[in-house]
């Protein structure tokens, strides 16, 4: 089945679901019911009635009855005024609103509607003459289609969840119930997808974060403000140390900048114009306005001005791991993947001449490849986002934009990396390259980014003297290899199901005693572990080791250590003491290792 057929099938199921809801709750009012990835949904207003998971089977049973009735999907049109009257007569206020928008502006897309035009509709005037409807059985809906010919052609489906959704995504509008379903051409494909979802639940970083004691969310602190527990703080610090070691040998210099700045800095950089709604603000006692930093770049540009005089000072590579904050909408917040703060970006800005741009960008791509190989991440690709100059978003010299985009394209081609292009997705200040992968749900996701800034250097009058003494603006590469450390932790927990590489595990080794007669031998084992220093990939890193000598059964100790996904468990009993060995338990099994070989064994992990 091709994508067009699958889309028509899923769209038809949205109508069948709505008609089933209408049979069960005759007073239901409907919003929109589009196709989404792997399925469909419909926004529904049932007044005080709330649909629960337990009612899914009843809705599905009604849907199957409608399907068995072999209803044709009948397409017809209606004059716009007659359609508005239809919505009124059938007590469908949301459809009436959509139809009025169509009549007034020729669109129902909220962001495309002109607020100044939302007044009274002039009698006799209309942006559209007629609108499209589909009917199956006794259910009629405003819809452009397409649909299958008959309800029996819709394949296999299942209702998955119910969620709250503001009408047209506006928090000022009524809240509706969004009923989701998934659908595939065959039952086999549906079963495979449902199995993937079950596996994804086991890998959900929010569940793993609590289980592994990585982070927690407190309603007292607020949504989108995760608290990193000791293990999470250790993990975050290890990632920061790893990247800093890689970057400093490549010429990056670390700086430390404030988390707030006066509004004039963001006005100068242009962020106030484009991102004001996404920034937290502070008004001080002198009525001055400050922004809580949502990004490091404006601060780094101030450092640039103090360090660079001429082309001899370039390239300049400034790096920082500071906690940033962004005013994300509460409905978008998800564990560590989408937070308000802290957003600890693995951030750097590389200031270059035009002649240096390609080679420095290739070095950034090479660093991406090295780091992701260390984490065994290979299912990723790059997306080159370019400007669409028909949009008002993009300012500055178009020739410079295009030349920069071409240099990035050439850099990726020369390195032979896998990339796609997306027009109109560039940042407001230049082309960018996003690192794309698929998460545990199979959805495309961005885990890191690198951007070329061709606009802000001139806007902020950043300059250097070239070899002839002329003043020039640098080009800036913004790059974050791991993205934000919090987001990367969430992503990586899901990818590994919580079984982190040995070097990255917050607790690497736990010694489990069988009884108290081996405590003196445990001291010997611990002394060997304390003397081990890991050299790669994190240099000068001592083993993180604990001892569980509680008066509990060995089985309980093993279960608790395994629940925390500690990669190495050393079991020590009287026979081990006598044989001068330990039992080493890992994910792959259990084996005996001589005490004098323990160090080399662990260094090989």
Image (tube, rainbow, N blue to C red):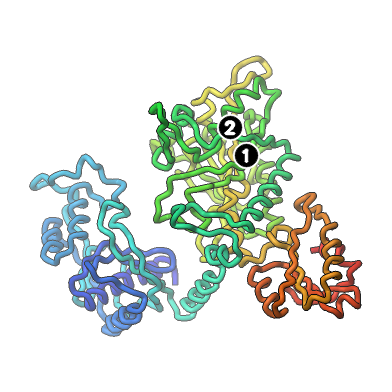
Q: Mark 1 points at which residue?
A: 320
At horizontal 42% and vertical 31% (from top left) the residue drawn is 284
Q: Is residue 429 shown left or right of residue 211? A: left
Q: Is residue 594 shown left or right of residue 492? A: right
Q: What's the distance in space between the residues labelled 2 and 1, CA to CA? A: 9 Å
Quadrant of the drawing holding the N terminus:
bottom left
Q: Which numbered tag is attached to residue 300? A: 2
**SS label for mark 2:** helix
Residue 537 vs residue 141, the one in the foreground: 537
Q: Do the residues labelled 2 and 1 touch (CB within 8 Å)?
A: yes
User: What is the quadrant of residue 353 in the picture?
Assistant: top right
Residue 548 vs residue 506, the one in the foreground: 548
At horizontal 64% and vertical 30% (from top left) the residue drawn is 352
User: What is the quadrant of residue 54 in the picture?
Assistant: bottom left
Quadrant of the drawing holding the C terminus:
bottom right
Q: Residue 117: where, in percent of width, then height? A: 20, 42
Q: Residue 70: where, in percent of width, then height? A: 27, 82
At horizontal 25% and vertical 79% (from top left) the residue drawn is 71
Mark 1, other Cα within 10 Å: few <14 / some 14–19 / many ≥20: many
């Amino acid at each position: 089945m091709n994508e067009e057929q699958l889309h028509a099938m899923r769209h038809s199921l949205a109508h069948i679901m709505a008609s089933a809801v209408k049979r069960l709750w005759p007073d239901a009012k409907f919003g929109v019911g589009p196709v989404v990835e792997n399925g469909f949904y419909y926004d529904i207003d049932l007044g005080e009635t709330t649909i629960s998971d337990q009612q899914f089977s009843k809705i599905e049973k009604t849907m199957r009855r409608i399907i068995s009735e072999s209803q044709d999907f009948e397409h017809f049109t209606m004059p716009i005024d007659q359609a508005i009257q239809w919505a009124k007569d059938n007590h469908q206020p949301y459809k009436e609103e959509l139809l009025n928008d169509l009549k007034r502006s020729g669109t129902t897309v909220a962001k495309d509607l002109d607020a100044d035009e939302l007044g009274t509709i002039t009698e006799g005037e209309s942006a559209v003459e007629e609108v499209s409807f589909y009917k199956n059985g006794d259910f009629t809906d405003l819809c452009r289609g397409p649909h299958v010919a008959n309800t029996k052609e819709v394949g296999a489906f299942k209702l998955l969840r119910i969620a709250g959704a503001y009408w047209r995504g506006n928090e000022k509008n009524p809240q509706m119930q969004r009923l989701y379903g998934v659908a595939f051409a065959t039952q086999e494909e549906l079963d495979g997808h449902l199995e993937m979802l079950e596996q994804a639940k086991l890998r959900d970083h929010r569940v793993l974060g609590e289980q592994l004691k990585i982070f927690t969310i407190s309603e007292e602190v607020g949504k989108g403000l995760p608290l990193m527990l000791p293990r999470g703080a250790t993990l975050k610090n290890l990632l920061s140390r790893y990247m800093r070691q890689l970057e400093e040998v490549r010429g990056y210099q670390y700086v430390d900048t404030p988390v707030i700045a006066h509004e004039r800095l963001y006005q100068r950089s242009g962020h106030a114009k484009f991102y004001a709604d996404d920034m937290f603000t502070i008004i001080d006692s002198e009525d001055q306005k400050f922004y809580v930093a949502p990004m490091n770049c404006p601060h780094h540009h101030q450092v640039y001005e103090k360090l660079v005089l001429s082309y001899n000072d370039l390239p300049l590579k400034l790096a920082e791991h500071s906690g940033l904050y962004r005013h994300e909408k509460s409905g978008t917040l998800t564990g560590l993947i989408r937070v308000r703060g802290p957003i600890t970006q693995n951030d750097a800005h590389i200031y270059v001449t035009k002649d240096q741009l390609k080679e420095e960008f290739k070095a950034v791509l090479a660093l991406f490849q090295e780091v992701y190989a260390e984490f065994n991440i290979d299912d990723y690709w790059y997306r080159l986002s370019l400007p669409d100059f028909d949009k008002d978003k993009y300012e500055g010299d178009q020739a410079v934009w295009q030349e920069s985009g071409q240099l990035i394209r050439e850099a990726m081609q020369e390195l032979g990396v896998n990339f796609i292009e997306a027009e109109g997705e560039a940042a407001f200040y230049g082309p960018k390259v996003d690192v794309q992968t698929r998460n545990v749900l199979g959805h495309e996701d961005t885990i890191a980014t690198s951007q070329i800034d061709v606009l802000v250097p001139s806007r902020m009058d950043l300059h250097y003297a070239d070899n002839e003494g002329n003043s020039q603006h640098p080009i800036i590469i913004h790059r974050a290899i791991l993205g934000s450390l919090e987001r990367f932790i969430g992503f990586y927990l899901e990818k590994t199901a919580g079984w982190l590489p040995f070097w990255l595990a917050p607790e690497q080794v736990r010694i489990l005693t069988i009884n108290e007669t081996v405590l003196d031998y445990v001291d010997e084992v611990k002394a060997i572990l304390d003397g081990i220093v890991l050299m790669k990939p994190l240099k000068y890193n001592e083993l993180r080791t604990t001892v569980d000598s509680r008066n509990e059964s060995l089985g309980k100790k093993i279960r608790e250590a395994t629940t925390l996904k500690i990669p190495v468990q050393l079991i020590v009993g009287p026979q081990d003491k006598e044989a001068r060995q330990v039992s080493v338990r890992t994910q792959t099994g259990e084996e005996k290792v001589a005490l004098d070989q323990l160090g080399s064994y662990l260094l090989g992990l």
